[in-house]
Image (cartoon, rainbow, N blue to C red):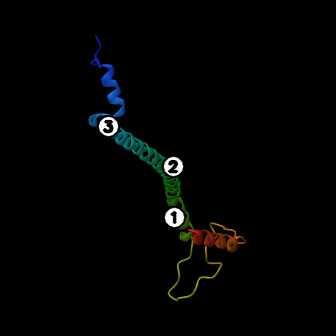
Amino acid sequence: MSAFPARGFSSMGASTTGQSPALVARVNEKKAELENLKELRDLSAAMATQMEALAQKLATLSDGTEAIALVLSNWHNVLRAINMASAKLPKPSAGVQEPSEEDLPQTLVRIPTEHAPALQAHAEGAAEEE
């Protein structure tokens, strides 16, 4: 026996010309469900793209944080070197006078300045673009 009820030939002809309202409603319901699923798929794809972009930004942020932590971990060495250099300075006497070049400690860091104007112009150009 078949799970479907048997229909006569006369009922088959009638169903092809005029569909039952329940069947039409069910088809329309399935079409609406299909549209909702397509929209859900598109939104899910957009969300996945945004999550990937967020993951890349977080990776960049993590790398930057590690670099900052490395720089900050070296500050105690810098401050200790400055303190050692400053300890060798003669204490000023009661008379207020400006320290001469001979009284100052030796330069600890030498930064080349011949490229400073070009670097400053490049930094200003990048700041204007943002």
The residue that label 1 is drawn on is: 79
**Residue 96 at x, y percent in the picture:** 53, 88
Instruction: Judge the density around disc 1: few (<14), some (14-19), many (≥20) Cα neighbours within 10 Å.
Output: few
The residue that label 2 is drawn on is: 56
Secondary structure of the residue carrying tag 1 is helix
Q: Residue at x 61, y 73 (%)?
A: 124
Ranked by sequence position, the earlier of labels 1 and 3 is 3
Q: Amino acid at mark 3?
A: Val
Instruction: Give the camera-side residue of 73 and 115.
Output: 115
- Which quarter of the figure has residue 97? bottom right
Camera-near label (2 vs 3) is 3
The residue that label 3 is drawn on is: 24
Q: Image check: 18 left or right of 88?
A: left
**Residue 129 at x, y percent in the picture:** 59, 69
Q: Image check: 97 left or right of 121?
A: left
Instruction: Judge the density around disc 3: few (<14), some (14-19), many (≥20) Cα neighbours within 10 Å.
Output: few
Camera-near label (1 vs 2) is 2
How far separated are the C-alphas under marks 1 and 2?
Answer: 35 Å
Instruction: Judge the density around disc 2: few (<14), some (14-19), many (≥20) Cα neighbours within 10 Å.
Output: few
Q: Name the residue at the top extreme.
A: 1
Ranked by sequence position, the earlier of labels 1 and 2 is 2
